[in-house]
Amino acid sequence: MIEYLAYVIFVTVSWMMSIYGFNFYYLFFRSINNKNGKQLIMKNSSYNGDGKGNGEMVLSLNNNNNNNHDLNLPYVTIQLPIYNEKYVAERLIKAVCRMDYPKDRMQIQVLDDSTDETREICSELVEYYKARGYRIEHIWRSNRAGYKAGALKEGLKKADGEFIAIFDADFVPPPWFLKRVIPYFADKRIGLVQCKWGHLNEDYSTLTQAQALSLDFHFTVEQKAKSLTHLFMNFNGTAGVWRRSCIDDSGGWHIGTLVEDLDLSYRAQMKGWKCMYLDDVVINAELPVQINAAKRQQYRWAKGSIQCAIKLLDKIILSKHLSIDTKVQAFIQLTRHVVHPLLLIQFLLLPLLLAMNYNIYPIQSAPLSPLIAYAILGPGFYMYVMRRLWPDRWLSRMKAYFFLILFFTGISVSNTIAVFDALLGSRSEFHRTPKFGIVKRGEDWRGKDYVLPFTKTTLLEIFFAGYGIVGIFISIFNGNAVYAPLLALQTSGFIYIAALSISHSIFNNRSRVDNGARGRVRDGSSIRSEVDYSYVGGIGKGRDGDKDKGNDNIERGVEAGVGYGMKHYRLVLGGILALLMFGVVMAYIGYASSVYPLEKARGYIAVAVTSNSPTTMLEYVLEIEQLVPEKGNPVWVFPTPRTDFGMMHKSIDEIKERLKVIATLPRDSEAFNTGMSDVRGQLAQLEDNIREAVPYVYVSFQNVVLSAIWITVILAIFTLMKRSKARIERLEDVESERVGSS
């Protein structure tokens, strides 16, 4: 019964995942045949009106741009939501101010919620450009109410533009952006124009290559397929322009979800507005280079999408004005992140079904069919897509695709937590994705602010990695090696993400010495360090004595403390890796010593029941006797005689004695045939008892206790690592304050 239930869940999950996978193929073919966007491509455009929203936009093909046309351009408000972005804020503001759009028709809002020196950077830049004739203002809030959506909503109160362009801090819009995009609003049905994201640092690492390919698939396939059709497309939060009247008509920015962009774009399309995607207008942006930052971004997108599904799906499904395929596509897009928990369920169930020797496929060669289908519809189809979309670089994209599989599998742990957080209605705090201004291969980000530590999610990633390794062994030893490559690929994803999570969190002692003002707060003052100068490094001079000598003592104390902390931190990290390897080895030894013999015994039983010779059958029974434990019951809660190894041995003894008697009977006698039939029945019953016992061997009392101890030790080590890191941070705060005051 348990095996059957697990099998039904496994098959159901597999089919659900397939639906989401096939939907990508459907959108791909729609994208290459979407003619709507192509019909609106224009060479030059102009705007006829009074510049205050009282005119209309018209297409003007084959006209040369000149200053007279600039006089008819509409007012545009550019909103730049920023929160603690000291490494990229200046790059963004300078890029926006370089736009070749009339200064008197371009309003720039720096929506700054920063609590660090980003606030001073933005303020100085705003004053600089304001003195040069730009209509630019620095809007700072004393709280982050509503997070990004709240900042956009606040800025909209002071916006006078007919159109609203939005850029996140990690984007670098080109000078020609507004003049290229605004003319598409000649069609008054269009409420949003979304542009394609480019990548400043795609080749920085395998991680950035994987993220870049994922985003390229989204824009070039999904967004292009839905642009200007009855299918809903989404605003990506940045690199796009809204019609102000569309935002107002759709109810404005809501702050109830983590993806205010998806929320507003769906509400706008439900109101009848059209959204357009421009595949040939590319706005470059910085990809997250730290895995913990990338996981945070993916977590926010996953949780926010499910929140929007909860908020909007009932209205979409019950709408009388939307077609069936519009509703289906909306459902798939809003719920797409449920693929992550489904993947984990599938990953957990497959080794269990293999361990129970459940006949997943009734035909012997059938296990090959899903793997062949996976190869064709997975890598095979994606290779076709990449050759079609990027014919000159599809080979390099295939490499990125391999790491994208690892990335997608590994982040399924974090995204599963995000899905359940959304379903359970947990508090929606907006955590931004840190950016470090990294655009070239080899640039270092580890010594900068905003570096994120690994979280307890890494423990789950390590668990799934270890579980996958055990699953590979199970598939091989149980004669189902055909599943080993699939399990190995998924396991590699968990190892890849867990390894990056740990290695990207190793603390660098340059972390805050070079930025000076980590301790600044909203009023520009400095926070006093938590560490008393007189006790740094055990040196008790410098507080009331000679200042220079005290500074020297502090510096030596910080260096000594940081050095000790880094050494301690790395030793603990090495301990975690060693403990992980120890756990994997012990899991393998445990499987080889307790589970594998039982599986081998079942194999001997399968061969024995096919034999017509009582002597040969007896030889196999003697082998089985050596493999089955002499006593004990793996079911430690409500045990039954069926799973008692002592009772199994009694059955084996009966079979042995009976075979010895049968061996003396004539082969053509009725007693011989009846005896052999009875023995086969006893062997079949023994095989059923062993199969029933095997799952409980995995979760025996001993294994549960050992696993609990193993996880507890890892948690303890993680706690020590956090304390070690906190010590380093406190010591370096002393150095930062000293440098700032000198």
Image: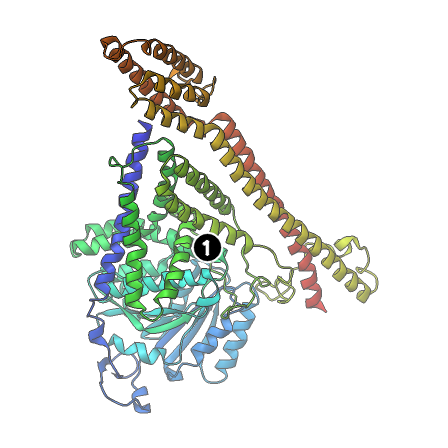
Based on the displayed image, in which of its 4 quarters is residue 741 positioned?
bottom right
Q: Please tell me which residue is depicted at 57% across the width and 67% down the height of the picture.
A: 117
Where 719 sits versus 88, above or below?
above
Note whether residue 182 is visible: yes
User: Could you tell me residue 255's position as x and y percent?
Assistant: 38, 57
User: Could you tell me residue 129's position as x and y percent?
Assistant: 49, 81
User: Could you tell me residue 242's position as x and y percent?
Assistant: 31, 69
- In the image, taking residue 489 as reference, residue 511 lies left or right, namely right
Where 59 sits versus 627, above or below?
below
Q: Please tell me which residue is depicted at 30% across the width and 37% down the height of the picture.
A: 9
- In the image, taking residue 400 as reference, residue 315 lies left or right, namely left
In the image, 51 versus 189, the foreground residue is: 189
In the image, 525 versus 423, the foreground residue is: 423
From the image, tell me which residue sits under label 1.
Answer: 296
Note whether residue 75 is visible: no
Callout 1: SS:
helix
Amino acid residing under circle 1: Arg
Based on the displayed image, in which of its 4 quarters is residue 202 positioned?
bottom left
